[in-house]
Image: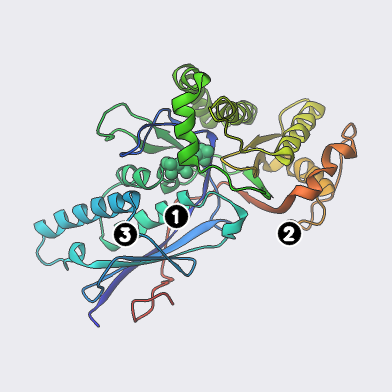
Amino acid sequence: MAKIYSASTTAPVNIATLKYWGKRDTKLNLPTNSSISVTLSQDDLRTHTTASASESFTRDILWLNGTEESVTGARTTACLAELRALRKKLEDSNSSLPPLSSYKLHIVSENNFPTAAGLASSAAGFAALIRAIADLYELPQSEEELSRIARQGSGSACRSLYGGYVAWEMGNKEDGSDSRAVQIATEAQWPDMRAAILVVSAKKKETSSTTGMQTTAKTSPLFKYRVEVVVPERFKQMSKAIEKKDFEVFADLTMADSNQFHAVCLDSSPPVFYMNDVSRNVISLVEKLNSLAGRIVAAYTFDAGPNAVLYYLERDESVVLGLLKAALPDLEGWQKKPAVIASVPEGISSEMYDSLKEGVSRIILTGVGPSPQKTGESLVGDDGLPK
Ligand code: DP6
């Protein structure tokens, strides 16, 4: 077997606080509005990917969590073609480089969280894929340039190339060259942001985000107002709140934007539902907690599914997690924080959180984290197959 070249990386999940919802170009995957997200720690949620290339490989293959996945879809094809073209340019200018751009790729990818949890894994997946291949090819391109490629795999993936607090600027050029992610603040600049993910079981298959956002963009009258009026203003306010580390403004906008995203989903024809009764109960509980505290201690946000993500600051951990532990004492996930004492603030009735017991299956306690990390741990064996 000819020499195998390889590079490995881990990449994070990100959860949007200002939602991307709507495409103005489906081929280039260009959005109708800018968005903002927080990158989560890879200790708890990450995709680990090894990209390898060899003259001996006969076709491009991707194994995800042990199963072979298609690499012939339009999105993956577009990403691979762009990365190969960049590598080819390097090879053309330096003939001593091995011709990796002409070799087939074997890519092995693993998530450290259960796929069944229904957590958006396409962002971490495409970010890891792009980063690992860029490292394998020794590409000099910046994160910003790579984010334009990742965007074509899955929109939200472009934000997972950075750690901390990230904006995807929609851009307005037709060729998409100005639609890319930039960092608003590093994880070190605002390190005390925590996230609790409540995994809520979905009974029926959800509408994929790609399909859901197309329906909304085509049919919702409210959508136009959202992208033209609400989001541009919110984008400025949220960026500023992050720069100033103003949690209350950040949290207030995060909840408002989650609610508006689900409102335009409901305003679509046919309507698209992602939250369920358990999700709505989480909203009521957080709203009540904030009103009892007299300030915003936690923010909820929901993506294209019923799972809740709560953002809060480390200083308020005991009040936020104490309430969650009182409501959900037996969940898998509390092992991480054995010191949390279950406590219910006066004014919250047990009916408010009783219903959560049925619907929440797991809690993932995490926080803001860094960008993709190179690792020496390869998932590809000497035979070019998954280890
Ligand atoms: C609700 O990035 O999954 O999570 O570009 O079609 O792959 P595609 O969509 P995707 O959509 C994410 C939607 C969201 C909001 C967000 O992450 O901003």
Q: Is residue 280 left or right of residue 212?
A: right
Q: Amino acid at mark 1?
A: Gly
Real-space Cα separation, disc 1 to disc 3, in angstroms:
12 Å
Give the mark nearest the N terminus, 3 or 2.
3
Q: Amino acid at mark 3?
A: Ile
- The secondary structure type at the circle numbered 1 is helix
Residue 323 can be seen in this image = yes
Determine whether label 3 and label 2 are within 8 Å by CB. no
Report whether the residue tagged 3 is closer than 8 Å to ligand 1. no
Residue at 24%, 33% (x, y): give it.
Answer: 175
Report whether the residue tagged 2 is closer than 8 Å to ligand 1. no
Q: Which residue is mark 3?
A: 133
Few, some or many residues within 10 Å of mark 1 (<14, 14–19, 20+)? many
Q: Which residue is mark 2?
A: 332
Q: Quadrant of the N terminus?
A: bottom left
Determine whether label 2 and label 1 are within 8 Å by CB. no
- The secondary structure type at the circle numbered 3 is helix
Give the mark nearest the N terminus, 2 or 1.
1
Quarter of the figure with residue 250: top right
Real-space Cα separation, disc 2 to disc 1, in angstroms:
24 Å
Q: Quadrant of the C terminus?
A: bottom left
- Residue 168: % across, % down: 41, 35
